[in-house]
Each structure stands twice: as C-alpha cells, then as structure tokens.
Image: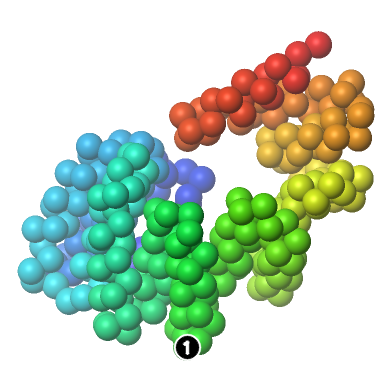
Amino acid sequence: MIDFDSLWDYSDPAGTEQKFRAALPAIGPDPGRRAELLTQIARAQGLQRLFTKAHATLDDAQALLPQTAARPRLRYLLERGRVFNSSGRPDQARPLFREAWEAGQAAGEDALAVDAAHMLAMVAPPAEQMDWNRKALALAERSADPEARRWLGSLYNNIGWTHHAGGEYEQALAVFIQAEQWREAQGQAREARIARWCVARALRSLGRPDEALSRQQALRAELEAAGETDGYVDEELGECLLALGQADAARPHFARAHAALSQDPWLAEREPGRLERLRRLGQP
C-alpha cells in the first residue's frame, strides 16, 4: 500500500504533484484511497497557488466520499479548507477545519484532528489562536499515535510564534528552546536549524542582538559547510548588525536576503513592505 505522506516534498509541490499522479494507477478501484490521493494532489496544487485546479481536484475527491470511511472525508475537509485559506478566504476555511477537528476526534484519527486544530489556530481571531494551539498540543501529547506525536515540534513552533506576535518574547523564547530540544532529540537536523533561527529571532526581539547575531552566524557557518544558503538567515544577520549600529556590515546581508526572498511568491504577495525594506537596506 502506498504511503502518501512519504511522497511529499513540501519544497517541490510541482514535483510532488507529479509523483501523486504517477501513483494514481496503482490505487485501483478503492474509492477511499483514490479520494485520499486526490486530496493530496489538490494540496500540491494549492501550494503552487493553482487554486482553481485544486478546487476542481477536490470536487473529484468529494464525489467519491459517499463510498468511503471517515479518513478520506477528513483529508477532504482539511485540504478544501487549506485551499480556501491559502487563497485568502479564511472564513470559508474555518468551518471545514472545525468539522475536521470534531470528526477526527470522534473517529480516533488523532493526527488529522491535530492537523485540523493547528489550522484552526491559523485562521482563528488572534484572541483564540493560543487556545487552538494548546488544544492541538494537548491531543498530540496524550495520543498513542506516532503520527499525532510527530506534530509536537511544529506545535511548539506555532505556540512560540503566537507568543511572539503578542509581544510575549520571553514566553516565545522558552517555547522556541523547547522546539529546538525536541527537534534535536528526534534527529531532525533541518527542523532543528529552523528552531535555532527562531531562538535567535526571539533574542533579537528581547533586545539581545549580540546573542542573536552569534547564533545566526553559527547558522550561516553551518549552511555554508553544507553548501547551502538561507535568505532568512541573511535577513536576521542584517537586522542584528543594524541593531548593533553596523549598517555597512549589514548591507550585503540585506542584499542577499532580498535576492533570495523576493523569489518567494507567497512572501511577495503577503509582505511586499518587508521585501522593499530589504531592497532599500541592501543598496550601496
């Protein structure tokens, strides 16, 4: 049986879509498996911002749902909601995620229920976001399902950013450190690096740019050793140096950050002011 989740490469949604399409003939006549796979094709299309195609694919999946058990319907609800949310319609996404949360718990599908709660945290009003994050965390922590427990690192990260968005930088730092420790314990090198970036970001928000700079420099050295770059690391190196009064030293980092991050369609759409600031600060 094909493990759909093992085919995912979130950094390459177009390639992932092709892998899913190549797997369709192997599904056979099982409507549940076919519906699940179609929902994942739709998710890949949504990540490519092909929202009309994603909804059409989900329509095909929806037509199969009367012949299926609970899991394909949960996948359908989650992915329809994600496409609505990604296309700027969170109000249409919210009831779908809520239904997936309730139905997932009732069906004992803990991992999908956790996914639903984490999405509800994303689309909820700010006053409700922490509550949904904590509901997701509580279910993941008490679940015996390894797939549900794999959400813990992401949930620590999300809770940290919810604290950060609320100006609760000390709390954010504590949770980011927890995320870093969890990722390292799981041997998740890439995710642990992201968690270390978050720790450094919280330190800068706390007015500790020298400590933040040291951590970002260590991250950059690690990336260089692996032959990689990261626009977000360069952005933070620039911000830390700027906070320390070293505008000239910050400039090339801002320029590199702009060159990398301006290629991200999501960031270009959602945060044009941020990209413009990077462009301006990176100019000679």
The x and y percentages for residue 257 are 70, 29
Type of amino acid under label 1:
Ala
The x and y percentages for residue 34 are 19, 62
Q: Is residue 225 visible?
A: no
Q: Could you say whether the residue bearing mark 1 is in a helix, strand or loop?
A: loop
Residue at x 39%, y 61% (from the top left corner): 120
Residue at x 33%, y 68% (from the top left corner): 2
Q: Quadrant of the N terminus?
A: bottom left
Please name the colour scheme applied to the rendered image: rainbow
Dot 1: few (<14), some (14–19), or many (≥20) neighbours within 10 Å? few
Which residue occupies the extreme front position in the image? 127
Q: Can you identify the residue that label 1 sits on?
A: 144
On screen, residue 246 versus residue 41, left or right, reads right
The correct choice, above or below, for 95 with respect to 244 in the image is below
The x and y percentages for residue 177 are 74, 66
Q: Nearer the viewer, residue 284 or 207?
A: 207
Residue at x 52%, y 65% (from the top left corner): 130
Q: Nearer the viewer, residue 61 or 174?
A: 174
Residue at x 17%, y 44% (from the top left corner): 56
The correct choice, above or below, for 45 with respect to 175 in the image is above
Q: Nearer the viewer, residue 123 or 38?
A: 123
Q: How many marks?
A: 1
Q: Quadrant of the C terminus?
A: top right
Q: Nearer the viewer, residue 147 or 250?
A: 250
The x and y percentages for residue 242 are 85, 30
Q: Quadrant of the rendered structure where residue 274 is?
A: top right
Q: Is residue 123 visible?
A: yes
On screen, residue 170 versus residue 209, left or right, reads left
